[in-house]
Image (cartoon, grey):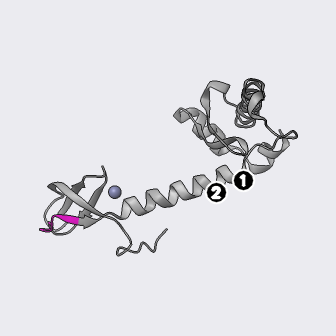
Amino acid sequence: MTDINKKAAPQRLVLEISRSGSWGKVQYSHRLECGHSEYRKRALVTERIACTLCVKAQHARDTLTEIARATTIEYAEPVWVDEIASDIATSETDIGKLRASLASVLGLSAEAIDVVSEYNEDGLKVSYVVVFMDAEQAIRVAGRSKAEIIDI
Ligand SMILES: [Zn+2]
């Protein structure tokens, strides 16, 4: 994501401008209504400026949606409305399996894996997965070779 189209970036209200940096390296942080900050060499006088981080955030959400689509849990049987109770039980089991499998591959406890899912007309769909790691775990996982992970 190096080519952000600033014209496509949404215009956000500037809430606060703060100056930072030493002489010659001064920059102005423009705190925006969306929670992001834009940095410029000069303080802007316009009420609204384009937020490139909003574009990056949208790109990240689109990527997550693509991943979620690719990981939609398939059901062997069609899901019927009057079987919602048993359907939920099956779904919870599938999510449990997904969590356990990810935890095993990453060498983490199941509590470290948060599977966020939602129902749509096709049944349960995994929206995204959040993995919580402390610094030591992150370094350990990052240090593993790809082959080691695949071999598990
Ligand atoms: Zn923003």
| Frontmost residue, 44 versus 77 | 77
Q: Where residue 89 appears, x then y in whole percent?
A: 75, 24
| Frontmost residue, 9 versus 138 | 9
The quadrant holding residue 79 is: top right
Q: Where residue 143 appears, x then y in whole percent?
A: 66, 44
Decide: few, some or many residues near mark 2? Use Cα within 10 Å; few <14, some 14-19, many ≥20: few
> Label 1 amino acid?
Ala
Residue 45 falls within the magenta-colored stretch? yes
Q: Which residues are magenta?
A: 43-48
Decide: few, some or many residues near mark 1? Use Cα within 10 Å; few <14, some 14-19, many ≥20: few
Location of the C terminus (image quadrant): top right
Q: Residue at x 73, y 23 (%)?
A: 85
Instruction: Determine whether label 2 and label 1 are within 8 Å by CB.
Output: yes
> Label 2 amino acid?
Glu
Which element type, helix, strand or loop, lies under badge 1? helix
- Label 1: which residue? 70
| Residue 109 visible in the shown view | no
Q: Residue at x 22, y 58 (%)?
A: 13
Q: Is residue 88 left or right of residue 150?
A: left
Q: Is residue 124 left or right of residue 138?
A: right
| Residue 16 visible in the shown view | yes
Give me the C-alpha separation between circle 2 and circle 1. Answer: 6 Å
- Label 2: which residue? 66
